[in-house]
Image: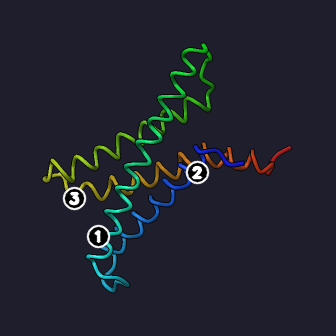
Amino acid sequence: MISIKILVALMILFFSFVSLFTILEIFGREDRRLSIDKLKSFHKISGRMLFVLIIVNVLLGIYMLTKLATEGINFSAFGVIHAILATVVLIIFFLKILFIKRYNKFYNHAKVLGILLVFFTIFLFSVSGGYKIINRLGLYFYQ
């Protein structure tokens, strides 16, 4: 059975791709399949869904960290890499929101931050969620 962490990670990955696709369509093509208003609304909806899912993920992470701290369990190298990547994704996400909502002079940098956000989300998922899914399905590529 797939855990809630994997489901949340898959939804984050899905909405990241939706956001990336919509923003690439808006700024990267002249012959768009959809109107700019529809693409912007899709981007805004997927961004809000990402915000909610990232908050859920942060709460799950805080719960797991407090559980680890109370049980006195040390982090594995895998856990440290996951925590660092998750922190990077969180910082980039909130920095992008600040650039768009508060610091409008940095608005042009929000595009780069969005692409970095998708890159680190894919990287985080492949390192953490992809490993867990392969492990649960029993697919091993080495002996």
Name the quarter where the C terminus is drawn.
top right
Give the percent coordinates (x, y) of residue 86. 47, 39
**The furthest residue to the right:** 143
Q: Which mark is residue 40?
A: 1
Give the percent coordinates (x, y) of residue 19. 39, 63
* Image marks 2 and 1: residues in contact by CB distance under 8 Å: no
Instruction: Name the mark nearer the viewer: 2 or 1.
Output: 2
Give the percent coordinates (x, y) of residue 103. 15, 48
Q: Residues within 10 Å of mark 3 (few under 14, many from 20)?
A: few
Q: Amino acid at mark 2?
A: Leu
Q: Residues within 10 Å of mark 1 (few under 14, many from 20)?
A: some
Front residue (pair 58, 74): 58
Front residue (pair 104, 61): 61
Q: Amino acid at mark 3?
A: Asn
In 3D space, how far apart are the residues under numbered discs 2 and 3 (Cα atoms)? 32 Å
Q: Residue at x 64, y 49 (%)?
A: 130
Q: Amino acid at mark 1?
A: Lys
**Count of numbered labels shown in the rendering:** 3
Horizontal placement of 123 versus 135: left or right? left
The residue tagged 3 is: 108
Q: Is residue 81 above or below residue 55?
A: above
Q: Which mark is residue 7?
A: 2
